[in-house]
Image: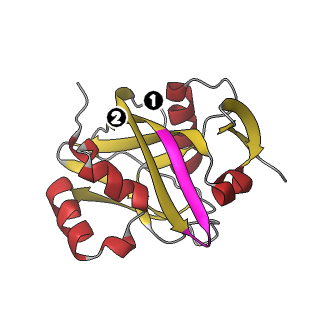
Amino acid sequence: MTENIPAWVDGTLAPVDKPEVHRRGLRHPAVSVFVQEGSRTLLQRRALGKYHTPGLWANACCTHPHWDEAPVDCAARRLREELGLTGLALHPAGQIEYRAEVGNGLTEHEVVEVFVAEAPPGLPIAPDPAEVMQTGWIERAELAERIRSTPDLYTPWLRIYLAAGLGAVTAP
């Protein structure tokens, strides 16, 4: 089954097959969410069946919006689909554009709307095993140290977000 996502082709936003977007390294909109509980942030380890960066740790969730889908609606949808999380207040935390090789000849070139949500203690998480193989909470300072010592265990975008200071964003 083909999944088209919005991507810029010759300066115009158009629907393009998702794997083709990444093969060609086309610039495209994306959404990324950090779920935090105080000084801890929720990480997910990507399922081994993912076509790029399988088994790597990332922030709570990242995705591509559907055509005409508002970024905040996209973020809420993906939290529900990947982690079974609903009802969290999502707060805009800025925008970042990056380009990174993600293995197997694929490139992410994303313009990302970043959101943050504060989780209540004991938040129940129900990951979709087709998307997520593991979740865990980690102190932000410990995450920064682990990324310095073992960067290859983490997705390029998580490393980029933290280097830009987005991992320390807190909800109002």
Q: Residues within 10 Å of mark 1 (few under 14, many from 20)?
A: few
Q: Nearer the viewer, residue 110 or 60?
A: 110
Q: Which of 170 and 19 is in front in this view?
A: 19
Q: Which amino acid does label 1 sit on?
A: Gly
Q: Which residue is drawn at 34% across and 35% down?
A: 116
Q: Which amino acid does label 2 sit on?
A: Ala
Q: Earlier in the sequence, mark 2 or mark 1?
A: 1
The quadrant in which the C terminus is found is: top left
Q: Position of residue 147 (x, y in %)?
A: 26, 67
Residue, disc 2: 117
78 in magenta = no
Q: How crowded is mark 2: few (under 14 residues within 10 Å), some or many (20 or more)?
A: many
Q: Which residue is drawn at 47% across and 58% down?
A: 100
Residue 84 shows up from this direction: no
Using residue 37 as the reference point, say whether residue 6 is left or right of it. right
Using the image, determine if residue 95 lies above or below residue 160.
above
Stretch in magenta? 103-111
Q: Position of residue 50 (x, y in %)?
A: 62, 65
Label disc, if present, on residue 87 of the rendered structure: 1
Using residue 135 as the reference point, say whether residue 55 is left or right of it. right
